[in-house]
Amino acid sequence: MTVGTAPPPVRTPVRPAAKRRRPGRWYPYLFIGPSLFGVVAFLLLPVVIVFVLSLFDWELLSDPTFVGLDNYRKLAADGSVWSSLGTTIVYVLLAIPLQTVLALLLALMLNQRVKGVKFFRALFVIPWMATPMVLGLVWSWIFDPKDGAINQLLDVFGITGPAWLSESSLALPAVALVSVWQHTGYNMLFFLAGLQGIPQELYDAAACDGATPVQRFFRVTLPLLNPTMFFVTVTNMIGAFQAFDTIYSMTAGGPSESTTVINFKIFHLAFREFDFGYAATVSIVLFLIILLVTSVQIRFFSKRTTYDMS
Amino acid sequence: MKRFLLYATLIVGSVITVFPYILVVLTAFKSQEQLHTTAPWLPGVPPTTDNLTKLLGGEFPQYILNTALMTAALTVGQLVFTTFAAYAFARLRFRGREVLFWLFVATMMVPVAVTVIPLFLIMKELDLINTWGGLLVPYLLGSPYGIFLMRQFFRGLPAGLEEAARIDGAGPMTILVRVLLPLCKPALGTLAIITVISSWNSFMWPLIITSGDETKVITVALAALKVGIGVDYTAIMSGGLIALVPTVVIFIFFQRYIVRSVVLTGLK
Amino acid sequence: MKSPRIRLTLAALLALPLAACGSGGGSSESAGPVTLTYRLWDEQQKVGYDKVMAAFEKANPNIKVKIEVMPYDDYWTKLTADAVAGSAPDVFWMQVSYFPAFVTKGVLADLSPLKLDPAKYHPNVVASNTYEGKLYGVPKDWGMPGLLYNKDLFEKAGVEMPDKLTWAPDGSGTLVELAKKLTVDEAGKHPGEAGFNPDKIKTYGFASTNHSQTQWMNWIESNGGKLVDKPFGKYVFNDAASAEAVQFGVDLITKHHVSPPATQTNPPTGKAADMFKGGQVAMYPANNALLPYVAPEINFGIGVAMMPEGPKGRAVNINGLGESVYAKSKHPEEAMKLAKYLAGEEAQKSMADQGYIFPALVGDSLAQGYIDFWKNNAKPVDVTPFLEQSKGTTFNMPIVTGWTGFEQKLTGIFNEVYLGKITAQQGVEQAVTEGNATIK
C-alpha cells in the first residue's frame, strides 16, 4: 500500500470542461488511501476475526474449536445477556436525550456575547477530559449515603437521601447522570462548531420576515445543525451502548446486576470467564443492534431536508 | 432579566460541572491525615504539595513525556489523514463511497474488549509488541470517529464552493487546502482537541501493547497507583490532577480555533 | 518457538498475508547477556525487587532482569493477551484466583526441575501453587488478615484488647461485648443502652463488611463450615454452619449495631478502610499487606490482635503469591535460574527485611526481618500476631477453575446479603449453585 508513488493529480488544460463535473475515478482513493489501509488492517480486520471467532469455542488460553452456530443458540437462551441488553437500553435512554438537549442549550447560550465565554466553554468540557478511574472514585464519594455531598445537601433541606449506589432502582440513573455530566460539555463543542458555521445573513433574513427567536431556532438553527446533530446522536449512541469503565468503577455491575451493561458483560465473558468465542458472539449481536439503531437514525436524518445555499 | 437568568444558569451549571474536580484538586493537596479528618469538599489546612512533588520527583515526568510524544504523533497523523479521507467522503464522488464510509463507522460498533485480542495478534505478527510502532500504528492513519466528524462539516459547506476554483484549474488538493480548510477552522479545532485529549487519555491499547517503562503512558501509570489491596487517594488524585492540567492548557490553546473572531448570535 | 496453534488457525482461516512478515524469532540464540522480563502488580514492592534483582544480576552477570509493573486491575487482562500471543514475561506473579485458569491451560512451566523442598514453605502457599502434585509457582510470600485496632479509641472507651476474642452465631462471646463498648452514638450512648440511636452512630466498634478473604470466609471456617471440598473441587458452603456464620457477619451490622451499614462498605466503593483510618471504626480485620497503606495515614496508635475464635476455634484465611515461569519462555534456563533464586533465602529475606512481606519460607528467623521492620517503623506496629496465626489453623481461598468468572457474581450476591435484601441462607445457597455451575 504505497500511496506516495502514485502521481499527484495534475489538471492539464487539455481536459475538457465536462471533466470538471465528472472528475477522474482514481484520485479520491488517494485521499482515502492511507486511512483505508489503517482502518482495514487495524480496525476492520480485527472485527472480521471477531466475527469468525463467534463461530468458535475458544477459552483464550487453549486452541479454538469450531462449533458453528452453537454460541448463537446459547445466546438465544441466555437470560442474563438479554437482561443486560435491557439495562443498556435503559441506560442509553436515560443518558442520550438529556446529554444532547443540555449540550445544545449550553452551546446556544455560549454562542452569544457573554462575559467570560471562553472560561465557561473550557469549564464545561473539563468533565470529558478526566480519566475514568479518577471519576469513578470521586463520584462514589459524592454518592456516599452518609458523608456524600448530595445527601449532605439534601440533609440541609431536611431530606434523608437514599443509598444511591446500593438501591437497584437508583444505581442506573445515578451512573447515567455521571455520563450526562461527563458528555454534555463535550457534545456542546460540536454544537458550538456547528453554530459557528451558520451564516448570520440567514438569521437576519428570518428576523426581517418577523420570525420570533423560537421560530428562528426551529426554522433556521435546528435544520442547519442537522449534520452536527446527526454526528452527535450517532456517535453518542454508539458510545453509550458500549459504556463500561466509569460504571465499572462505581458499581461493578451491582446492586443485583442492575447496572450490568452489555459491554461489561462482554469484558467479563472474555477476560474473567475465558469464554472468548461467546464474548465475540455477544459482541456481534451488540454490533447488529447498534447498526440497526444507527440505520434508523440515518433514515430519520436523511428525511429532513438539508439546506441549499446556492 | 434574561441576562440574569442566563448567567444564573451558567453559574449553576459550572458549579455542578466543576464540583467533582474541586474534590480532586482539594484531595491532591491534602495530607493523608487531612484526607480522613476533613470533608472531601473542604480544603486541608495547611495545604501540602507533598503528593505532587512525590509523583513528579519519581518517574511521572518520563510518563508525561511519553504521553506527550504519543499524543503529538497521533494528532498530527490523524489530523492529516482524517481530513483527507473526510474530504473525499464528503465532497468527491467515487464508487463505493457510502459503503466504505459506513464500513469505517461500523468498526466503532464492536467493543474494544473483543477486538483488542485480534489486533494484538496482528501486532505480534508484525513484531510490534512493546514498541512505539505498535503503540502508534493502528491509530496513526486516521480514525473513523474523526472522519465522521469532518465529513459532516465538509458536507455542511455550500455546494458551489469548489466550482470557481475548479474553473481556475485548481486540483482537488488545492481546493481542499485553499478553499475548504479555511472555512473549516472551527471543525479542525474541534478535531484537534478531540484527538489530543482522547490520545492523551487512551488506556486500553497502551496497556495491552506495551509493558515497559520506556513506553508507559500516564493513564497506565495512574491505574498502577490503585493496587488491589489499598487505595492511596491523595496519590491518585494528584496523578489525576497532573494528567488533567496539560489537557486543559491544550484545550484553551485550541479553543480559539473553534470560535471565529466574529461572535455570531444564535439566540437573543 | 513463538507460534501457538491459535495464530496459525486464525491465519489460515483468514488467509492473513501477515504470517509471512512475522520474523523467525531466532534472534535469541546469540551469546552475551540475556534479558529476562519479570512482571508484578505492586508499585511498592517493585522498589524492593529492584534490590533483589540487582543482587541476582550480580551473581549472574550474563542475565539482566527487566521489571515491569502493571496496574492490578488490568494485570490479568494483559497477561491473558500475552499468553494468547505467546509474549508473556519470563517470570511473573501468580495469584490463587487465577492460578487454576492459567495452570490448566499450560501457561505455567512445571517447576519440578528446581527440586524445591515443599516442607520448607508454608503448606497453604505450596497448595495454592500446586497442580496435580507438581509445583507451578515458587511460593513467594503469605499474607493473612489480622484484627487491626485503634488504640486511642480503646483508651477512650476504657477497654483493653483481651488475649483472645471469641464469637458465636448467637451473639455471645467477647467480640460483640467489646464492640458494643466501643460503639458510641452522637449522644454518647452504647448499643443496648436506653436512648441509643443506631442511625446516629459516631464511632463503630467493628467493621463487618462484604469482603471474602478478611471477613465472612473466616466466620464460615471458624464455625465448622468449609468453602470447598478440596482444591480443584467444588463449593460446599451452603450448609447450616456456613449460613449461620455469614448471618453473624450481617448481625454485627443490623442486630448488634456495632458496624457501619453495608451501604457504606459494600464493594466496589466500600470505605471501611477509610473509616478505620479516619478513626470512625475501632476494630478492622485487614490483611497484613494493607499495613503500608494504613500505617503512614493514621494519627493514632495501631495494634494488631489475632482474629476472633469461633465455636470451632480460630481458622484464618491465608493467601500466598507464587512466582511462575512462563512455559513458552524464550530463555527457560535463565528463567528457571531466577525462579530458583526467588525461592531461596537470600531473596525472600531481602523482601522481608524491607518490610514488604512475610516470606513463604517458614522459620521465625526469616520472618523476624518483617517483624523488626514494623517494630522500628515511624508508626510502630507489632505484627507478631500474624505470624502466630499462620502457625494455627489456616485455609486457602478456593482453588477452583472458574473462580475468576464467579468472584464478581459472588461479591454481588453477598452485597445483597449484607444489605439484608436476602437472607444468609438464601445467599449461600445461591452462591454455591451459581459457583458450581462455573467450575470447568
Image (spheres, rainbow, N blue to C red):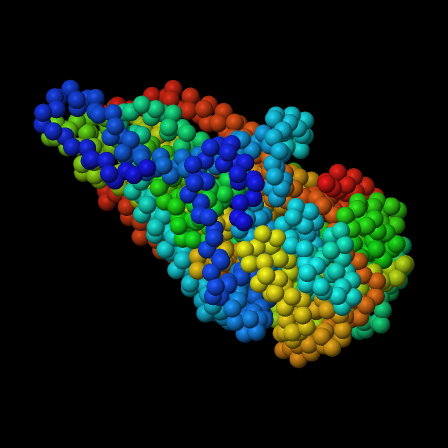
Observer-nearest residue: C323 or A285?
A: C323
Q: Is residue B120 left or right of residue C170?
A: left
Specify the quadrant that holds the C terminus of chain C.
top right
x and y percent of residue C244 in the render?
A: 86, 50
- The picture places residue C236, in percent across and down from the top left corner, at 83, 46
Looking at the image, residue C382 sits to the left or right of residue A121; the answer is right
- With C107 as the anchor, is C167 left or right in this view? right
Q: Is residue B240 above or below residue C120?
A: above
Residue at the far bottom: name it: C376
Report the label total: 0
Residue B162, above or below C103: above
Q: Residue at the far left: name it.
A: A13
The residue at 19%/33% (across/down) is A9
Q: Nearer the viewer, residue B193 or C418?
A: B193
Query: Relative to B7, does residue C388 appear above or below in the rendering?
Result: below
What is the x, y in percent for residue B244? 43, 56
Give the image location of residue C68, x and y in percent: 53, 60
Q: Residue at x 45, y 24 (%)?
A: A295
Q: Is residue B134 visible in the rendered structure shown here?
A: yes
Q: Is residue B119 left or right of residue A63?
A: left
Q: Residue at x 54, y 36 (%)?
A: C9
- In the image, C170 versus C107, the foreground residue is C107
Residue at 59% across / 58% down in the picture?
C332
**Residue A139 in view in this figure:** no
Please determine whether, in this image, residue C347 is positioned above or below residue C70: below
